[in-house]
Image: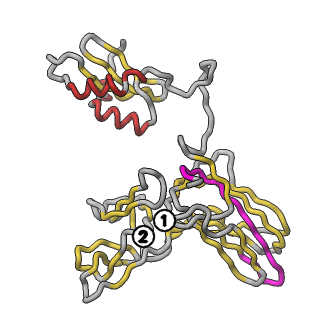
Amino acid sequence: MARFDRKLQVTWTQLKVLAAKKYVGFHSYETSNAFEIYIIEDGQISFWAWVFKDAADPRYSADDLADWEANYEANANGPTKPRDYDGKDKVQPVTLSTNQWHYWHSIGDTASTLRAGEQFKLSRSTDGDSDVSWQYRDPVWMVGGELHFQGAAMGDHVSFCVFAPATPVTASDGGNTGNCNVYDGVIVPAAGNGAYNVDLDDCHPVPTPAQDGYWDYALPATMKFGGTTTLSATPGAASYHLIAARFDLTRFVAKELLLGAGRTTYEPSNINASMCFPEWRFECEVHNEGGGHTIDVIWRVLVSRYWTTV
């Protein structure tokens, strides 16, 4: 067998982490004193590790060998891609992960109950804007949706937005004894000497691509209900901010003009589903231009999620 690239050699523990991140299985080649275990990416051998069998070898680890033989060896050397019954590679686009369900709906959740939130409908008969916002009890992956409308006149339009509501803060009692300060709306932790208090059980994390946040956020392991926000061990270099004002995360439909009655669909053929936190909110805003007529809209949304009945 061709010698592996030593630059890609890792420990067995590191190889397991890499395989999990890359969603690939293991391949192996057994020699007289070791298993050479590797993963395949783009048809080529990638990262690899030795697991030695000979206890006399200084690189031998009884734990690694037992782990490989008990938990991985029997399932190694499978196909590198999903295959159909006739052995041909199977390639298909997907909008959800294993154990998720597509979920078509026209009603939101509350923080504790499925389908106990707002219905997706709006009417406006005077000049100006009306909106409905909704939430999900659990993490969801946004795929798209569809809008039906009637009675629209020239200048009427609709917008859809995903936003993080303002994280509430309260003034600390008795002076600067709180757990945070607020600078330009950004909530910054303070060790008991802040002007405000923030309740981390009632907050709305905002991702920061610059990695200059102060807070960590973790989804629940069960993917049911909200996540957990904590003070980061690396404040100023963490993945999330808390903001004391509404923060619009994305406006994926921006003042789309409507006229008469019809239907508009927001489901491109090359969908890449976007993960959304339970702490975020979703909003439809309808604008009536000038009044004197009534515009009615209803819509349905497609997401993928783990929980749909309980």
Residue 259 vs residue 1: left or right?
right
Q: Residue flagged by tag 2: what amino acid is it? A: Cys
- Say which residue appears at 81% left-offset and 72% top-offset: 152
Give yes or no for residue 303 being in the magenta stretch: yes
What is the span of residues highlighted in magenta in the rendered image? 287-307
Q: Is residue 149 above or below residue 59?
A: below
In the rendering, at what x and y percent does residue 306 appear? Answer: 54, 49
- Say which residue appears at 72% left-offset and 58% top-offset: 146
- Say which residue appears at 24% left-offset and 13% top-offset: 33
Residue with the mark numbered 1 = 279
Residue 305 vs residue 54: left or right?
right
Earlier in the chain: of badge 1 and badge 2, it is 2
Residue ranking furthest to the front: 310
Residue with the mark numbered 2 = 203
Task: Give the SS element for disc 2.
Answer: loop
**Picture quadrant where residue 130 is located:** bottom right
Q: Residue flagged by tag 1: what amino acid is it? A: Glu
Quadrant (top left, top right, bottom left, bottom right) of the C terminus: bottom right
Task: Give the SS element for disc 1.
Answer: loop
As drawn, the label of residue 117 is: none
In the rendering, at what x and y percent does residue 62 appear? Answer: 21, 25
**Picture quadrant where residue 104 is located:** bottom right
In the rendering, at what x and y percent does residue 296 appear? Answer: 78, 72
Q: CA distance from mark 1 to mark 2?
A: 7 Å
